[in-house]
Amino acid sequence: MTFDVDAVRAQFPILREAGLDGRPLVYFDNAASSQKPLAVLDAIRAYYEHDHANVHRGVHVLSRRATEAYEAARTDVARFVGAASPDEIVFTRGTTEALNLVAYAWAAFLSPGDEILLTELEHHSNIVPWQLVARQTGARIRAVPIHDDGTLDLEAFEALLGPRTKVVAVTHVSNALGTVVDVAHIAERAHAHGAIVVVDGAQAAPHGAVDVAALGADFYALSGHKMYGPTGIGALWGRASLLEQMPPWQGGGEMIETVTFEESTWAPPPARFEAGTPNIAGAVGLGAAARWMLDLGPAAIAAHEASLLARATELVGAIAGVRLVGTAPHKAGVLSFVTDGLHPHDIGTLLDEQGIAVRTGHHCAQPVMRRMGVDATARASFAAYNTLAEVERFAAALQRTVTLFG
Ligand code: C6P
């Protein structure tokens, strides 16, 4: 069956907005945040119009309906990542909060001299929480290097693993380079050394199927707003046996069993990690986004985006004076590049004037920028609603920009 991109686009009202040149905007900033289909917008509106109250608290009809909607969303997200049970899904504000949650809770099991293994590909949100926890516990951060094309150096990874390795925290897809990491291999090797494996799935979840069972990791973090859902909501999948061992990282309502002034006892997961009134409407929107992606077909989305990336790589790679940053054989959704003579910010501004939105900067991944020998890149990133015609318009605009100003 062919992928009907026009039918997909019709579900995104915002794609009818014009860019600065008066033509429909080419939105290639999906890795920063994707646009939302009607299914998500409608679900949030219907929730507030018909079902809103606080969850898990009231005996009245609206509280029951809100709780049902919130827990149904948990089931949708569990299905989306292939979790064994909805209880393995903790709602968070996003990937950043999910990674902070694991780091802070897992600090309870770290001692001086323990090692936390990261990679040079990581986004700051999979570096800084671990640094804070390392400072608190006396654990040490080590980083797996990458090759020049942006693939992980698996030999170096193997050499860095050892009896002190307690945590391996790795991105599934690099937001700056697009490299897809072989998480299943990483997890298998890390587990052989007794380490837990934490995966930053922020840039993988929007692009295709996530199957936490097949990946074999222990924790998987994602953000709703990058996978067609709302902002301010995300999820942490955690292996049930590990979530059960973990202490809470934030205290408040909903996460306790009993409270006295002397001590409190904790609710079982996932409630233990969801202190306070959650983002109920956000969860409903994320559940709708997960269902929308599953209905469209994660494999079909991945195949469509692969054809966009292949064409963009071919066209942009052929422009004199443009250098691609990140050329791993297995990439998803992202084309990063620099040009001779123009700063990425100028490229971004000049493309914006031609109705094309890309992101420019260090992409909150300064170590990988440093490793690739650049301060910043321009980055085009693709979603299910993008078209080959848009890729061609982008390449032509970039060619024009480089010819006129490069
Ligand atoms: N990357 C980008 O333009 P939050 O902000 O919590 O939703 O996601 C953080 C995050 C974590 N890991 C990866 C791999 C990411 O790409 C991001 C967000 C955006 O690339 C904003 S910097």
Image (cartoon, helix red, strand yellow):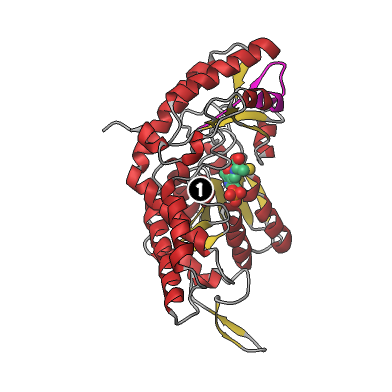
**Residue 283 location, x and y as percent?**
48, 60
- Nearer to the camera, 220 or 193: 220
Question: Where, quadrant-wise, is the C terminus in this rendering?
Answer: top right
What residue sits 71% from the left and 60% below the top? 138
User: Magenta segment range?
Assistant: 334-348
- Nearer to the camera, 23 or 239: 23
Q: Quadrant of residue 360?
A: top right
**Residue 305 location, x and y as percent?**
43, 32
Q: Quadrant of residue 277?
A: bottom right
Q: Which residue is mark 1?
A: 201
- Is residue 202 positioned above or below 324 on the image? below
- Is residue 194 positioned above or below 401 on the image? below
Which amino acid, mark 1?
A: Gly
For residue 163, say whether it is visible.
no
Question: Where, quadrant-wise, is the N terminus in this rendering?
Answer: top left
In screen coordinates, is 3 left or right of 264? left
- Nearer to the camera, 179 or 55: 55
